[in-house]
Each structure stands twice: as C-alpha cells, then as structure tokens.
Image (cartoon, rainbow, N blue to C red):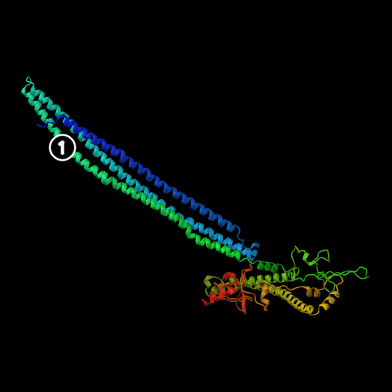
Amino acid sequence: MITFPLAVVKGLLSTLGERRFLLEEFSVGCEEDQFDNLEKHTQWGIDVLEKFIKFVKERTEIELSYAKQLRNLSKKYQPKKNSKEEEEYRYTSARAFLATLNEMNDYAGQHEVISENMTSLITGELTRYVQELKQERKSHFHDGRKAQQHIETCWKQLEASKRRFERDCKEADRAQQYFEKMDADINVTKADVEKARQQAQLRHQMAEDSKAEYSSTLQKFNSEQHDHYYTHIPHIFQKIQEMEERRIVRIGESMKTFAEVDRQVIPIIGKCLDEITKAAESIDHKNDSQLVIEAFKSGFEPPGDVDFEDFTQPMKRTVSESSLSNSRADGKSEPKFGGKSKGKLWPFIKKNKGAGPEDFSNLPPEQRRKKLQQKVDELNRDIQKEMDQRDALTKMKDVYIKNPQMGDAASVDHRLAELGQNIEKLRLEVQKFEGWLAEVEGRLSMRSEARRQSGLYEAQNPSAVNSCAQDRESSPDGSYTEEQSQETEMKVPATDFDDEFDDEEPLPTIGTCKALYTFEGQNEGTISVAEGEMLYVIEEDKGDGWTRIRRNEDEEGYVPTSYVEVYLDKNAKDVYKSLEKI
C-alpha cells in the first residue's frame, strides 16, 4: 500500500499553482500584448501605404487637369483656318508666338506623361501590393492566433489532469485515514476493516494512475510550450517582421519612382522652353517692318511743294503741282481720290467702301498689280482643278469602253463637255487679267526707268530740274494728265508673285525644304521636283497653298506646300550644303 503524506501533496499543489500563474502571466502579459501591438502597427503601415497611393492619385489628377488646361489655352489662341489671323503669322513676332503655343502643347503632353507613369508605376503597383500585403498579414496573424489557441488547449488539458490528480490524492488520503480508524476500532467487524482496506488501495491506485497521466500531460505540455515560445511564435514574428520591412522598402522605392518620373521629363520640358527662347530670339523687327511696308505700299510718288498762286495777275486760277487727280489730256476726268476738295493730298485719300471695278483700277499701282496677280493665280488653280476632273473622267470613260459591264461610256460625255467649256471660260478670264497685269507691270517698269534716268539727270543738272519744275503746266481742271502722273509715280520693289519678273537680283533663301512626293510642274510658274530632293526656299506659303523654291540660280518656281517639308533657318545655305554632303 502506498501512502502520500499530506505535506507532500500540499507542496506539490503549491508548486503547480505557482507554475500555472507564471505561465498565465507570460502568455497573457507578453504574447497577447505583443500580437495586439504588432497587429496595430502593421495596420498603421498599410494605412500609410494607402495614404501615399491616394496622394499620388490626386497628383495624377492635378497633372491631367493642368495638361488639359494648357492644351485648351494653346488651342484657344491658335489661328483659325481660312481667317484673317493666318495672314498675321507671316510676321516673325506672330510666328514666334505660334511656336510658343505649339511648344506649350508639347509641354502639356509631358504633364500627361507624368500622370500616366505615376498611375502605372506607382498607383497601380502599390494598389496590387496592398491587397497582397493584407492577405499576407491576415495569414500571419491567423497562424499566430491558431498557435495561441493550441497552447491554450494544451494548458487546459494539463489543468484538467492536474485537478484529477489532486482530487484522487485527496480521496486516497481520506480513504487511508478511514482505514486506519477502522483498523484501530475493536468494535468494527473484520469484514468492515477489509472493505475499508480495499477502498484505500483502490483510491491509492487511482491516485497513481492520475499521477502518471498528469506526468505525461505535463511533459507533453512542456514540449508544446517550448516549441510554441521558441519555434512557432518566433517564426511567426519573423515573418511579420520581414513583411513589415518589405513594406517599408516598397514605399521608399515608390517615393524614388515618384521623383524619377518627374526627373525623366525635365530634359524634354527644358527643350520645350529652349524652343520658346529660340522662337523669341528669332523675332526680327526689321523684317516685320519691311513686311508692313511691302503690304501697304501704294506706288505713288510723294507730292511736291505747293506753288504760290498769285491772284493779283489776271489769269485763271491754277492748281499746284501736288494735285493727284488722274485726268486725261482730252478733258475726260476720272474720279478724283481727293473727294470734294481738289487740293487734298494723297496720304489722306479715302478708300472706296463699295465694290471696285473688275480690273482693280481704283487701287494704287502696286496694290493693283498684287490683286491682279492673285486673281491670275486663283484662276490658274481653278483651271488645274477642272483639268484634273476632266482627266479623271477621261480615264473612267476609257475603263467603261474597255469594260462595258462596269458602266456606260456615254454617260460621262456631258460632264466632259461641261468641263471643257469651263476650262475655256477660265482661260479667257486668265488672258484678260494677264493683259491687265502686263499693262500695269509695263507702266511700273517705265516709271522705274524714268525715275532712274530722272535721278541721274537731277544729279548732273540740278539747276535745270528746278527751272523745269517752275514751267510745269496743269490741265484745265487743275489735275495732271495720265502721262504726267506716270512720271511722278514711284515704283516700289515687287513682292509675292511679281518676283518672278525681276531677274536683276534673285530673292535670298530663307530656308531649305525636302520634297515629300514627286510633283510634275506643268503650269507656268511651277517647278518639277522629285521625292526626297533637297531645295532652297525663297518664299513662304502666303496662304494660297504654294511655296516658292529654287533648285539653282536659273531654276525656280512654285510647288504645293503639302508636297514639301520646310526648314526655315537664318543659316539655311550652310544647312543645305551640309545636307548635300550627307
């Protein structure tokens, strides 16, 4: 029979109670608190990532909005097609402003690039990473909670085993005391004593079994606890730490990308600003002033001095030399520019607001020449369009003749006849306007030659010129005759299409161009070019769709602007030579 002293049982129970208290204190005070702290900290890290994502997203929206506003601003101030504004862009200052608008459009495009790159490289990537991070965090803390639940289950099993062992020990002690009492009592029968003895042995056996079970459970718990605190929990904490470190590294890399996206477009933005500066430096005030002069010159000779009219003499009142009326010698007078007053000077001539004559005879000589030249060019373009349509219909008719199933060849005859009549009418119109143009150019040439000879004569005989000025005669109505007015009108250097009639001094080159397509120049004034050919540009497109180019000193003409790519440069000849070497 095995007996357990009460003191031993009480000491064992006290030791178990202290161990239980220490385990509970460590588990609750350390592990639970650390998991809660880590859970809060990792959630804060995810919040920081999401806050950064939101920040970048708002930045991309700002960049897009800014780019859109810049594009709208650039579009707002772009010249409208077929409007008067297009004519203003022949001035260098206006072209510089147009270049600035185009560069601002490219500048806006770089802000769109910033928005796109930030969206793809930062916002999209981080959004996916945050979802993965949340799943990983959830998995790690789930493993931690599961490990905690397992160790708590083991602890509860140990507690239950310990309580059974404690209960069985107490029962065995009571049974032993009862047996000893019954054995000492002489009044108790032998059967009762034997029964008490068997009961005590049974209780002692149960206590032994409980002790073995408790010992086994305790060993198992200690092993599980060691694995829990030295393997499972440290492994979970290590994974959480690695997860958190990856998050920190990732947000740092995203911030670097945030700066790098901006840095990548800085060279292009700088190039846009350099182009704006270059456009500003290309402004030529002298050239713009000359364009104004060429646009508004009239061809009139400035009036001379007003003669003294002596009313004391019995003679008819005469008009001074400064009169600009163009009356004929036979007395048939034309409308005077001066309005009601005959003595009104030419700078103050009022423009005729109504529709002018067909030959533009109401305009000053130089302005009239320009208008006639423009009309001739317009008619030639119309003729070319009609001829292109006629050629297309002729080819269609040939196809119908060869393949009758495709159509009736006679169906296009009416249209071909109509086109032929239109072309003939337009050619007659061209001949008419070319006649007027030749007349004006002949007069301007005569006046230029007369002025040149007059200048030489005046330089050699100044006294004779002064005496001739006093002897000039006026027509009866006080205006000059046509011959007189021709001598006094001044020829201004021709511009636009009149340049092709001036062979004395060729126009300077203003750039180079590359032929994008082959063009067969069949009309007068045009020039044939081959695809890829490099040529000089001597006159820009004036809004009529034609650019004037030169192949060499003796070969120049017009080509459609859409057929060439123009490179304007102050040093165009050097650029052209370098391109030829290449």
Q: In the displayed orientation, state which residue is furthest to the top.
A: 187
- Residue 147 figure quarter: top left
Residue type at mark 1 is Ala
Residue 503: x, y in percent? 67, 78
Of 511 and 208, which appears nearest the observer? Answer: 208
Residue on which disc 1 sits: 212
Q: Residue at x 78, y 74 (%)?
A: 486
Of 213 and 108, which appears nearest the observer? Answer: 213
Residue 19: x, y in percent? 23, 36
Q: In the displayed orientation, state which residue is furthest to the left.
A: 190
236 sits to left or right of 560: left
Q: Residue at x 18, y 39 (%)?
A: 216
Give the SS element for disc 1. Answer: helix
Number of dots carrying numbers: 1
Residue 499: x, y in percent? 67, 74
Residue 435: x, y in percent? 72, 75
356 is higher (above) or lower (below) than 193? below
479 sits to left or right of 383: right
Q: Quadrant of the N terminus?
A: top left
Q: Residue at x 63, y 74 (%)?
A: 508
**Residue 382 visible in the current orientation:** yes
Of 283 and 538, which appears nearest the observer? Answer: 283
275 is higher (above) or lower (below) than 526? above
**Residue 168 visible in the current orientation:** no
- Residue 516 figure quarter: bottom right
- Residue 470 figure quarter: bottom right
Q: Residues within 10 Å of mark 1 (few under 14, many from 20)?
A: some
